[in-house]
Amino acid sequence: MVQRILQIVLPVLAIVVVGYLFGRKVRPDIGAVNQMNMEVFLPALILGALSSKEFSLSANRGLILGSLGVVLGSGLVAWPIARWLKVDVRTFVPPMMFNNCGNVGLPLAVLAFGEATLPAAVALFATSNLLHFTLGYSIVRRDAHFGHFLRSPMILATAGGVALSAAGIGLPGLVGVAVRMTGEVAVPLMIFTLGVRLASTPMGSWRVGVAGALVRPLAGLGVALLLGPLLGLSPLHRGMLYLFASLPPAILNFMLAERYQQEPDKVASIVLMGTLASLVFVPLGLALALGPS
C-alpha cells in the first residue's frame, strides 16, 4: 500500500520539480495556459471519466451525504483558522474543502477496496467536483452568480457526464476517443503549471502551505470520524469516507486561484505541501479505513 501511494505521489512531485525549474529559467506567463486547461482540457477529462463509469446515486446516498459533510465541515473548521493566521479566507478555505479525490483518490480506492468500489469512488468524485465548481467557485470569485455556473464548462461537463452515465449511454466511438485524448492533457499540464507558479512563490507563503497541509486532512478526518457512525454507513462506505477525508488538496484549487488571481502563490504552496504531507496522512486514513469497524 505504501509503495502504491509513493507510485502515485512521487510522479506528481517530479512533474512539479520540472515545472519549477522551467519557471525559474523562462518565467513564462501561464495565464493563457491555465485558461485553456480550465475551459477545454479539464471539462473533457471530467466528461470522459463520468460518462464511462456506471454508478447509482441512490445506492451511494449515505456515502455522498458523508462527503458533503466532510467538504462543508472542513470549510467550517478552516474558516476561523484562516482568520487566526491572518490569511484571506478565499485563499485558505477552498483548498481545505476540496481534495484530490480524482487522480489520487480513485486509484487508491480501487487498490484499497477493490474494483467493485469504483462506482462509489466516482460518485464521491462527481459530488466533490460539482461542489467545487459551484460553492468553491463562488468563494474564490467575488462576482460569481448563477449565470456563471450555467456557463461553466466544468459544470456542463459534470452534468453531461452524470446524465450520460445515468442513462447508460456512453460517448460514441470517435467522439469518446477524442474527448479522452483531450482530457489526458489536463492532469500533467496543471501539475506542471503548479511547479511554474512555485518558482515565483515568496518564502512567506510556505508558512501558509504548512498550515494548510496539516489542517486539510486533520479537519477532514475529524469530521468523517463523527459522521461515519451518525449516518449508519456500512464498514465499506465508512472506510471509503475515511480515505476521502485524508486526501491532499486538489490541484484544481490552484487552477482557480491562478485563473482569478486569488493569491495563487499561497494556494500553490498549500497544494504542494499538502501533497508531501499525504505521504503521512493518506496511510493514516487507510489505517482507519481498513482497521476494525
Image (spheres, rainbow, N blue to C red):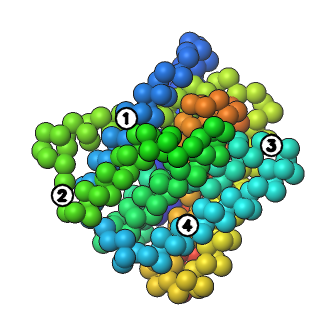
Looking at marks 1 and 4 on the same chain, the residue that comes earlier in the sequence is marked by 1
Q: Residue at x 69, y 50 (%)?
A: 93
Q: Residue at x 43, y 76 (%)?
A: 61
Contact between labelled residues 1 and 3, with CB atoms less than 8 Å apart: no
- Residue 208 position within the rendered picture, expressed as x and y whole percent measured from the top left: 77, 43
* Callout 4 amino acid: Leu
The label nearer to you, 1 versus 2, is 2
Looking at marks 3 and 4 on the same chain, the residue that comes earlier in the sequence is marked by 4
Looking at marks 2 and 3 on the same chain, the residue that comes earlier in the sequence is marked by 3
Which residue position holds label 3? 87
Distance from Cα at disc 2 to Cα at disc 3: 45 Å
- Say if residue 7 shows up in the picture: no
Distance from Cα at disc 1 to Cα at disc 2: 22 Å
Residue 244, above or below 49 = below
Secondary structure under the numbered disc 4 in the rendered image = helix
Q: Is residue 101 left or right of residue 222?
A: left
- For label 1, the crowd category at 10 Å Cα-Cα, with few meaning under 14, some 14 to 19 and many 20 or more, is many
* Callout 2 amino acid: Ile
- Residue 9 position within the rendered picture, expressed as x and y whole percent measured from the top left: 51, 48
- Residue 268 position within the rendered picture, expressed as x and y whole percent measured from the top left: 64, 36
